[in-house]
Structure formats: C-alpha cells, structure tokens
Image (cartoon, helix red, strand yellow):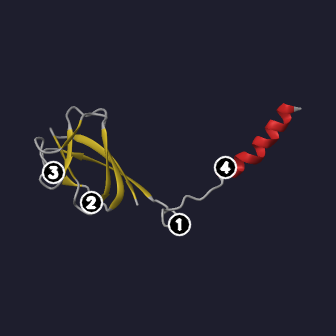
Amino acid sequence: MRKIAIVVLCMVLVPLILAFTVKEKDGSNFPQFSITFTQGTVGATATALTRECLKMHIKAFAANSGNIYVGDSGVTADKGWELDAGEEVVVDSYTFNEVYVIGSAAGQKYAYICYN
C-alpha cells in the first residue's frame, strides 16, 4: 500500500515541480532566446563574427590542424584567446564586430551558436 501511495504522490507532485515560470530579479518574465548556428573557415586574416548576440559559444573544429584565436579587431596568434582543436569559449553580451577570430594556418574551421 505504501508503494502505491508514493507512486500516486509522485505522479501528482512531479507535474507541479516541472510547471514553473522563470522570472528575472525584478519579477518580469525571463526572456525567450532564439538560437542561430553559424560555421566558417578562417586563416591568417582576422574575421569578424558579425552577429549581435546576448551570449555566444565559439568552438574550434576537432579536425583542425592548427589553432583558432578569439579576440577584438586586433586579434593575432600572440594576442588572442587560444582555442586548440575541439576547444570552445563562451562570450557574453557583445555587439556587432566586437568578436574576431583568426587561424594559425589557412583552413581552420570554427562554429558558433548565438543566443538572442
């Protein structure tokens, strides 16, 4: 009898636990995000990731033979956040043309997910 009561109790409580709305600190509804996936290839010339995002995950492809560097418009292999093949970095709240990528060699692939 106890097992049945626990199962019934779980069946009643689980929907209640899962049905909630996320709120901001000020009580307003949490914003809904749209997600955009983009990929590209970069070499020794810095390329702007021209999307306005609230948050962005940038990942170097696992098959890359070299590294990708993430930074501002002056990014170089000596001045940038290094991503080895398969590594990623998260960038919060940036605007157009503030994030650039450059490769240590031609043909380095990257992908990013942009949350808006």
Q: Position of residue 78 (x, y in %)?
A: 10, 41
Where residue 61 appears, as percent x and y from the top left, is 30, 37
Q: Secondary structure at mark 4?
A: helix
Of the image marks 1 and 2, the number of the one nearer the N terminus: 1
Label 2 – label 3 distance at C-alpha: 12 Å
Q: Is residue 105 left or right of residue 28?
A: left
* Location of residue 110 by image quarter: top left
**Who's the residue at 26% across and 60% down the image?**
50
**C-alpha gap between disc 4 and disc 1:** 19 Å
- Label 4 close to label 2 by CB (< 8 Å): no
Q: For the residues marked 1 and 2, what is the alpha-carbon distance in whole angstroms?
A: 32 Å
In what element is the residue under mark 1? loop
Q: Nearer the viewer, mark 1 or mark 2?
A: 1
- Above-or-below relation of 4 to 17: above
Quarter in which the C terminus is drawn: bottom left
Q: Which residue is mark 1?
A: 27
Mark 2 vs 3: CB contact within 8 A: no
The image shows residue 64, relative to residue 73, as above or below, that is: above
Residue at image coords 73%, 47%: 13
Amino acid found under the numbered disc labelled 1? Gly
User: Foreground residue, 68 or 105?
Assistant: 68
- From the viewer's side, name the closer residue of 63 and 90: 90
* Residue of label 2: 50
Q: Amino acid at mark 3?
A: Ala
Number of the label disc, if any, that sits on residue 17: 4
Q: CA distance from mark 1 to mark 3?
A: 42 Å
Say which mark, if any, is on residue 112: none
- Does residue 89 appear to the left or right of 23 in the view shown? left
Do labels 4 and 1 touch, CB within 8 Å? Answer: no
Q: Which mark is residue 46?
A: 3
Q: N-terminal of the two: label 4 or label 1?
A: 4
**In the image, what residue type sits under mark 4?**
Ile
